[in-house]
Image: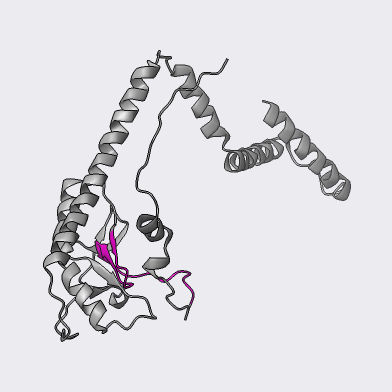
Amino acid sequence: MALKIFTISILALVLTNFNLSTAYDGFPSKEEISKWVELLQNSLLLDLDKYTGIKKLEKTYDDLRRAKLHKIDGPSLVHKMSSDITKYLEKKMGALEKLAEAAEKTIETYKFDPNINFTVQKFLNMKNFTDDDSRLVYSEKFNKPVNFSYSGVHIPVEIYEESIEILNGLNWTSSLDEVFRENAEEDPLIMQQYFGSYSGFMRTYPASKWIVLPQKPGFPDLYDVRLQPWYVHASSSPKDMLILNGMHYMF
């Protein structure tokens, strides 16, 4: 009702000016004025809802009026949260430990090959993937095309990818793909899995097209896994972590 009165007031002001400028052309009929009021009112309502979200706000209050209050057992809720977080972290730690153990066992028995050939060593260089690459399939989980069969490899631009050290590293870490796949099957909540080498290359599972950031034409790929915070912290920081869940009371 208030909006309609406001609309009529605006229209009255417009018509006053209209009447002054067209005094000899006749004044609009009552039916025409009613139509103008209705059109202007609907337009104002649409703009009001568009820029204020008033309908959503009204619905939210309606939902709250229908809501029911339930007593919450604070200690039980905190205990459940603690238990859920513990289980979640235990799964992630189990996957990490499994990957670390596999890497340690493989490197212990691996024989360094000084004559390794680049053409023989096969790996998926993520920089070589194209937008419509047939080896990649779109995944809703990752919101991009990926390859679940293998991990992808990234090598910094300043490192010669055919060096003996890099090729041997790629050779022995290729066996980690099996562990990557097992971890993903056992825990569907696991997202990307990474292996960063001190020599500079990185394995990422699942494989996907490498995106250079920022995405500017001709911008060089400056990414180096050894300079990333997660790699630096994992390789140099203490590994013990304590998570506290508590209840706060306000008086």
Q: Is residue 244 above or below residue 227?
A: above
| Number of numbered callouts drawn | 0
Locate residue 189 relative to residue 13 in the image: left or right.
left
Q: Is residue 200 above or below residue 244?
A: below
Q: Quadrant of residue 49?
A: top right
Front-most of 65 and 124?
Answer: 124
Whether residue 78 is in magenta: the answer is no
Residue 89: percent from left, percent from top: 29, 41
Locate residue 94 relative to residue 249 in the image: left or right.
left
Residue 17: percent from left, percent from top: 85, 45
Front-most of 97 and 29?
Answer: 97
Residue at the image position 16 percent from the left and 58 percent from the top: 102
Q: What residue range appears in magenta?
A: 194-216
Main SS, magenta region, reads loop
Quarter of the picture holding the C terminus:
top right
Residue 183: percent from left, percent from top: 18, 51
Observer able to see residue 82 = yes
Front-most of 233 and 176?
Answer: 233
Quarter of the picture holding the N terminus:
top right
Front-most of 28 and 49?
Answer: 49
Q: Is residue 109 above or below residue 57?
A: below
Locate residue 231 relative to residue 186 in the image: left or right.
right
Q: Quadrant of residue 192?
A: bottom left
Residue 61: percent from left, percent from top: 52, 24
Q: Is residue 56 above or below residue 115?
A: above
Describe the colour scheme in one phrase.
Answer: one colour
Residue at the image position 73 percent from the left and 29 percent from the top: 5
Q: Quadrant of residue 236?
A: bottom left
Whether residue 203 is in magenta: the answer is yes
Observer able to see residue 149 = no
